[in-house]
Image (tube, rainbow, N blue to C red):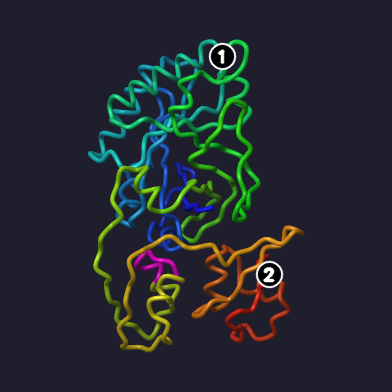
Amino acid sequence: MATVPGIDVSHWDAGIDWPKVRATGQRFMIAKATEGTNYKDDTFKDNWLGAKSAGLLRGAYHFFRCNVDAKKQADYFIDYVRAVNDDGELPPVLDLETNDGITKEKIVPAAKTWLDRVEAAFGKKPIIYSGQYFLQDYFVLPGGGPPPWAKDYPLWLAQYPNQYVEGMKPFLPRGWFNWTIWQYSDKGRLNGINAAVDLNIFNGSLEELYKFAGAKLPAQTPKTHKVAASDSFESIANQYGVTVRELVSANPQLLKAGEKLTIPIAIAIPQENLQETSSGTRTYTVQAGDTLSIIAVKFSTTIAAIASANDIKNINNIKVGQVLVIP
């Protein structure tokens, strides 16, 4: 199953180093813009522009307050996003998390009011973000089941196993049959962010993600980098916002000061070499160009943890085809 990794952020994740985030393999980000009619996230503009400069697809979300006028909330969101003079690529998002003491009979039409008004402003059908139980308890019609028009909106589902293994799928709420984005962790750790961050996957390939966003895959000319004595593959990857694997694949030679490296066009990270055994253990088959450092960065773990899990005495001695347990 093809998936693409991404994150969502807010003021809790202030001070993000976006090239470093992009170098971990993230391809999209969704940033909090507003809540109700009296809260604007003051990190939104920095996140919006920073993610763009690093080459991530971007979307904005509004935390919906069910006890506040839906039209006013829509206009509040529209005005704040429009203030950056850049609508982004991904559809806007309606974040439904709390009922604020309001009944489902009022929540459903209020949500539709917001969705219609925001779609008219941006020309894109918004994404609905929520959890399984909120949708089942509060986003339903009398007698049960979501409103018939709900199937027309992409679903971003929050559900937290906290670790994603290739092939996993979320449990869908009753009456929902497809999901577009899955927020599988609210405790993620990524290079470039000094706080826990929400981790997500898009349900499809990189090409399908760009199509969903109404964007074209970037046609770029590879850059070159002159190696300095202090450089490492990781530091160069962080500088240019590519993954270590992408960089090493384009430059399988050893690093030497004064040499020129090709900085590749960023692509999605394939996961076909990551497997899960029947006992739930993750394994990875070593590929040409791999080092323990590269593998650790790719799977958000450490060299020491991989070495310990595989009884590796010399961390510089791994072989192509070797099967490693990924802790």
Q: Nearer the viewer, residue 163 or 267?
A: 267
First to last magenta residue range = 237-244
Query: In the image, is 293 to the left or to the right of 85?
Result: right
Q: Position of residue 99 (x, y in %)?
A: 56, 20
The amino acid marked with disc number 2 is Val
Chief SS of the magenta region? helix
Disc assigned to residue 141: 1
Question: What distance separates the C-alpha of mark 2 from that of mark 1?
Answer: 47 Å
Q: Residue at x 51, y 11 (%)?
A: 106
- Circle 1 — which element? loop
Disc assigned to residue 325: 2
Q: Nearer the viewer, residue 304 or 324?
A: 324
Q: Position of residue 222 (x, y in %)?
A: 27, 70
Q: Position of residue 122 (x, y in %)?
A: 28, 31
Mark 2 vs 1, N-terminal side: 1
- Circle 2 — which element? strand
Question: Mark 2: few, some, or many residues within 10 Å (few <14, many ≥20)?
Answer: some
Query: In the image, is 75 to the left or to the right of 292?
Result: left
Q: Quadrant of residue 48?
A: top left
